[in-house]
Image (tube, coloured by chain):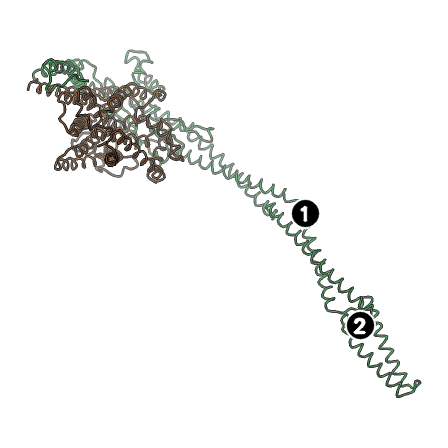
Amino acid sequence: MKAAVQSRQIIWATVLLVVLVQLSVMYGIHLLSIQLGQGGFYPIVLGGDDGKFHYAVAKYMVSSNQYGGNFDLLDVSIWPTVMAVFMKFTGSDEILLIKQMLLFGRLLTIASALLALEGLRKGNAVPDNPKAVLWSRVALLLLVGLFPSGMFYSFGSLYRDALIYAFHLTTVALVLHTITDRRPGAQLTFFLLSLPCLFALYELRNYAAYSIVLATAGWFVARGIRRIAKLRSPDRHRQNRTVWIAMAVLIALAVPVLWNTSTVQQIIWFRDSYLLMAGSNLRISFTGKNPIQAAPLYAYSWISNVIGPLFWQVRTVSNLLSFILEIPFLSYVGYGVWRRRSSITPACSFLIAQAAVWFSLISFTNDNLGTAGRLRVLGWHCLIVVFAYLVPRAKEIIPARFLRSRTLVPA
Amino acid sequence: MIRRVLVRILVPAVVAGAVVYVLTGFMPKTYASYQTLYFPLNPAGGIGALGPIAGAPSGGDAGAVSGLGGAIMYPLIGSGSQTAAGIISSHACQEDVVQRLDLANRWHTTPLNATKKLSAAVTADTDKTGLLLIHVTAESPDLCVAINNAVYNYLKHRTSELSENASISNRKLIEQRLTVAQQDLDNAQSRVVNVMQNTPLSEVGEVQRRYLEAEKALADAKASRDKEQASLTRMESEYHRMAQNGNDGGTITALTTLNPSFASLAQELQKRRLDLDDAMIAFSASSPRVYQAKAAYENARKASDQVRADLKNNAGVTSPEIIRARAELAALDASVHANEVALQSSAKAMSTSPKQYADSTLARDNFESSLSRVNMLKQELERATIMETRDPSRFEVIDQPYEDPAPTGPRRLLFTAVAFFAIAALAAIPFLVGIIRAAEATGLPDDQGPIA
C-alpha cells in the first residue's frame, strides 16, 4: 500500500516538475523577448516568424469583426481564427495570455503521451509489471516534457504547433485505444472521441490528419498480410519477412502509379516553392524526375528531415542550436528503440507506423531544415512513447511469456 | 506530500519571486511612445504579387533590387515600410538623433555608446499591410516623444534624398533610353518594309525552286520540240520519197495526200487526155479541134508537172498533218525560247538573291532586336514605376507620438513570475530525486528485478 502511494507521489512530483519547467521556459522566453524588444515573439531572429504574422491576422480579424475570412493569400489554418476568437473572448490581445493556450497544448500533449502509453499497455494480453509501468510514465513525462523542439516551438512565438502536437498525439492515442481495447463499447467511444480531435488536427495542419489515416490504413494492411502469412508458416521471422516484402512490393507498385497524379505533382511543386521563396536549405527538387531518379534524393531528404541538420548542413546559429540540442536527444531515443526492437509489440508498431508515415510525408514535402524541426516533432512524440514503454521492459526484467507475441509488425 | 511540496518547492519559489519583485522596484522606470506610419502598396496588389515583377527577392528576405542587368540599383527591397525600417535602424539615423537631442550629454556617455543605447531603445516593426510602427523606450515620456519625432524627421529627410537620387532618376533614365530605343525600332521597321518591298523573293529557297522549275520546263519544251521535229522530218521524207517516185501506181494517191488539190488536177488531166483521144479519133490531126484538145491537155499536164515539181521541192505541200506539225513545231520553238528566257531570268535572280536575302534578314534581325529591347525597357520602366510607387518617401502618419505618463517597464510581474517558476522548477528536481530514493529504499510493488 505504501509502495503504491510512493508510486503516485513519484508520478505527481514528476508532473509538477514538468509543469514548472514548461512555465519557466514559457515565461523565461517571453521575458527575454520583451527585454530584447521583440514584443513576445522569437527572442532571437531565427528566420521568418509565422507566429507574428498569424497574430497580426488575428488582430485584424478582431478589429474588422470578421472571423475566419478569406485569408488564403496569407495562409493557412484555423489558428489565426482561434487566436482572434480567444482575443474577443478575453477582451485582450496580450501575447502572454494567448500563450496560455499554447501551454494548454503542451500539457495536453503530455497527457496524450500518457494516454498513448496506456494504449500500448492495453495491447498486452498479460498484466504488466507495475514497476515498469511507473518508470515508463516517469520517463515519458520527462522526455516529452523536456523535448527541446517541443518546448521551443510551442513557446518561442505564437506558432500553432503546440496545438498540432497536442491534437496529433491525442488522436493517435485514441485510435490506438480503439485498436487495443477489447471492449466494443470502449472501442466505439474511443473512436468517436478521436474524430473531433482528427478534425481539429485537420483544421490546423491537414496533412498531419492525412498521415494518421494513411498510417492506420497501412498498419491494418500489414496486419492482414501477416495473418495470411501466418496461415502458411508458424515461423514468426518468416512471417515478418513476408510482411516486409509484401509492403515493399505494394509501395514499389503504388509509387510509379501515384507519381504522375496531380496531387503528387502539386506536392512536388509545393516543395519547389521553397526554392523559389529562398526558403530552401536542402535544395532538393523532384521536378522532372522519375521515382528511381528521385529515390536517392528522397533518402537524403528523409535523413535530413528526421534527424537534421546534419553536421555539414549547419550554416546558421539556429542550425547550430538545433544540431546541439536535438541530435543527441533524438539519437538517444532512436537508438533506444532500435536496440530494443526485439521487444516491440504490435501496438508499438502502430505508433512506429505513425512516425514512419509522417516522416515519409514531410521528407517528400519539406525542403527547409527549420521547418523540419517543427514538423518532425509529431513523429518523434510517437517514438518517445515507444521508447518510454520499451526501456523499462527490457528482456531481463520481462518474463518470456510477455515476449511471445512481440514482433515489429502487427499480429 | 503537500506539506513537503509547500516547504521544499513553494516557499523557495515565493521567496525568490518576492526578492525579484523588490529588486525590480529599484530598476529605472521606462516609458514608451509609439508612432504609426502608413506606406501605401502598389494598387495592382500585394507585395507577394508584385515581388517577382519588381525583381524583389521573394520570401521577404532583404536584398538589393537591380535593373537593366545590374546597371542600376534600386534603394528598395520588399516594400517602402521595410526600407523605412532599415533607415530607422541605420547607424546614420541614430547618430543624427543623438546629435540633434544631445543624448550623449544627457546620458553621460560617449556619442558612440549613446547611439548603441538609442539603437536598443528604438524599434521599427513592419507588417504586411504596409504599416510601420516606430516604438521608442526611454527614461521619460518627453524624451520618448522627442526621439520619436527626431527619428521621423530623419526618415523624412533621408527618404526624400533617396527618392531624388535613386527611384526617380532611375525612372527618368529608363524613359530616355526607351525613347531612343523606340526611335531605333521605328527606323528598323521602315527598313524592313523597304527591303521587303524591293525584294519580292524573300527566300533563297523560293528562287531556287523557280529556277529549277524553269529548267525543267525548258527541258520538257525542248523534248517536245525535238519529238515534233523528228515526226515532221519523218513525214516530209516519206512524202518526199513518194513524190520522187511519181511513176508508181500509187503516185496520185501519194500526191493527193501531199497536196489535196492534186486530185482534181489529176482528174482534169485525165479528162483532157480522154477529150484529146476522142478528138484525134473524130478529127484529123491538123484540125483545130484536135489542136485545141492537145493544147488543153498540155496545159493540164504542165500544171500537173508544176505541182509535182513543187512537191519534189516540198514547196507545194498542203497536207494538214504537215501544216499542223509545222505549226506545233513553231509553237514549241516559241515555248523553248520563252523557257530559255525564264531560265535566264531565274538564274539571274538566283545569283542576286543571297544578297537580297542577307539584306532582308539583317533588317528583320535589327527590327526584332530593337523590338525586344523596347519591350525590355518597357518592363524596366514598369518596374521603375513600381519602385517609385513603393518609394519610402511616400508615407502618411497614422499615429502621432504622444506622451504616455504610465511606465511600461520594468515588467515586474513578469520578472517575478519567471523567478518564481524557475526556482520552483529547480527545487522540484531534488524533491523528485528525494521521493524516488525513498521509494527505492522501501521497495516498489511487484518488483520483479532490476530496472534496465
Is B194 left or right of B67, judged from the image as shown? Answer: right
- B155 horizontally vs B67: left or right: left
Question: Which residue is most to the right?
Answer: B286
Mark 1: which amino acid? Answer: Lys
Relative depth, front residue between B152 and B357: B357
Instruction: Out of A280 and B194, give the one closest to the viewer.
Output: A280
Q: Which chain is brown?
A: A
Picture layout, residue B234 above or below residue B271: above
| Residue denoted by label 2 | B251
Q: Is residue B413 visible?
A: no
Please provide percent x and percent y for residue B249.
Answer: 80, 73
Q: Nearer the viewer, mark 1 or mark 2?
A: 2
What amino acid is found at the position of numbered circle 2 in the picture? Answer: Thr
Q: Residue at x 7, y 16 (%)?
A: B3
Q: In screen coordinates, is A166 left or right of B318?
A: left
Q: Chain of mark 2?
A: B
Q: Position of residue A257 (x, y in %)?
A: 35, 39
**Residue A134 or B67: which is nearer the viewer?**
A134
Q: Earlier in the sequence, mark 1 or mark 2?
A: 2
Residue A294 rendering spot, x and y as whole percentages? 38, 32
Q: Residues within 10 Å of mark 1 (few under 14, many from 20)?
A: few
Element type at mark 2 = helix
Q: Which chain is green?
A: B
Number of numbered discs visible in the structure rendering? 2
Disc 1 target residue: B348
- Is residue A264 depicted above or below A103 in this figure? below
